[in-house]
Amino acid sequence: MKILAIDTSCDETAAAVTRGTTVLSNVIWSQAFQHAEFGGVMPSLAQRMHEERIDWVVSKAITKSQIPITKLDAVAVTSGPGLAIALGVGITKAKELAGRLNIPLIPVNHIEGHLLSPMAEPSTKFQVPTSPTSLKLRGAGKQIQNSKSEIKFPALGLVVSGGHTELVLIKKIGEYQILAKTHDDALGEALDKAARMLGLGYPGGAILEKMAKFGDSKSYTLPMPMSQSPDKHSFSYSGLKTALLRLSASEGQVLIGEPPTLNKRQICDLAASFQNRAFQHLIRVISQTITDNNLSNVDLLVGGGVVANIDLRNRLRKMGKELGLKVRFPYSKKLIGDNAAMIGVAAGLKIKEIRNMKYEIGSIDRKATWAVDQDFSRE
Ligand code: KG4
Ligand code: ZN
């Protein structure tokens, strides 16, 4: 099953071609640079830029995959969650293509894409195969096998992105239960806001990481989020953010979004202290939730833009060792941030289910607030 996948949920225009869980092409055109001067994503600008680039990105993805367009079996598209007017661009293009090629159109949840992104595999087309790859979905409680690993269900999934921070129980592909989520900001959003407070620009997570590497995380004391709360299974970043705002103001930072008035040492130390607390809180809630639900000794699939952070990956690996979890990340950086290959992979993994569903192309529409545990195909 060869799938052309499209994602325009935020500020990346993305298209990919996948076969099962194999990624044949994965083309991403980021608009982050254009949004940087506004300090965040401008929805109307995102829509315009998606419209300008979608045809180029789609045709590049098809060319790179070396699959003729007429040989595609389905089109998959992110229908939500995301910015409604941005999602609309990808959905319109996907409907046009599926209609013209007379092939099914599969709506995919963006968070499900991030959750399943560690299951994506590189194409061996141009490599000498070292061992055979056989990848089969055999249903609930069974295994998916490939040359490298076996993923058993139920498994756990963690999504840490700019819009979501969720620990999910993956009962089987397509059946999800949210075990922990954030009360307010997502982790990536909190890192972006912290970077902005320190005058580091947008998008902030990556630059905050760079600064944090040179800083001392013990130089400033920031509060541990939710430490006094009886709710041990939720994330919260708004209090930590306010604490950083106060602290940076007391250190001399003048205005949010303005160039830094702090010196480099102060910025690096504040970045390290903030990132450390934000990650400590994340790990603490995940560990507690996993322990309280007796979920040790399972696979933990981790996806979303914040996974690009090396410190976070190390902390998750360490936690995995302590709790007996097999922690799995996507095989490439291009599968970590927003991309369409993860959408194609998610659609490919659900293909049996989808074949029986017969989505009406006309009925597929954007679902800006579609939660991953809400299955709209059964609504
Ligand atoms: O998954 P993603 O590309 O888009 C959403 O679906 O939101 O995630 C974007 C988020 C942003 O908040 C960005 O700052 C964060 O991922 N991010 C990072 C790093 N690279 C991107 N956060 C921490 N360290 C990084 N190296
Ligand atoms: Zn995303």
Image (spheres, rainbow, N blue to C red):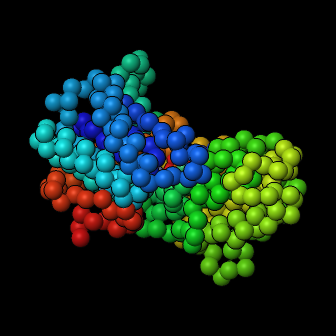
Image quadrant in which you'd find residue 27: top left
Task: Out of 134 and 115, give the one closest to the viewer.
Answer: 115
Q: Is residue 12 above or below residue 131?
A: below
The total of numbered circles placed on residues is: 0
For residue 170, say whether it is visible: yes
Task: Out of 206 and 195, give the one closest to the viewer.
Answer: 195
Name the image quarter holding the N terminus. Answer: top left
Q: Is residue 379 above or below residue 165?
A: below
Left or right placement of residue 282 versus residue 100 in this view: right
Give the image location of residue 237, x and y in percent: 65, 66
Task: Out of 355 and 156, give the one closest to the viewer.
Answer: 355
| Residue drawn where x is 71% and y is 47% of the image | 200
Give the image location of residue 300, x and y in percent: 52, 53
| Residue drawn where x is 59% and y is 55% of the image | 188
Give the image location of residue 191, x and y in percent: 65, 55
| Residue drawn where x is 20% and y is 34% of the image | 72
Left or right placement of residue 72 versus residue 42 in this view: left
Name the image quarter holding the C terminus. Answer: bottom left
Give the image location of residue 343, x and y in percent: 36, 46
For residue 288, say whether it is visible: no
Task: Out of 93 and 323, give the one closest to the viewer.
Answer: 93
| Residue drawn where x is 48% and y is 39% of the image | 30
Left or right placement of residue 41 versus residue 356 in this view: right
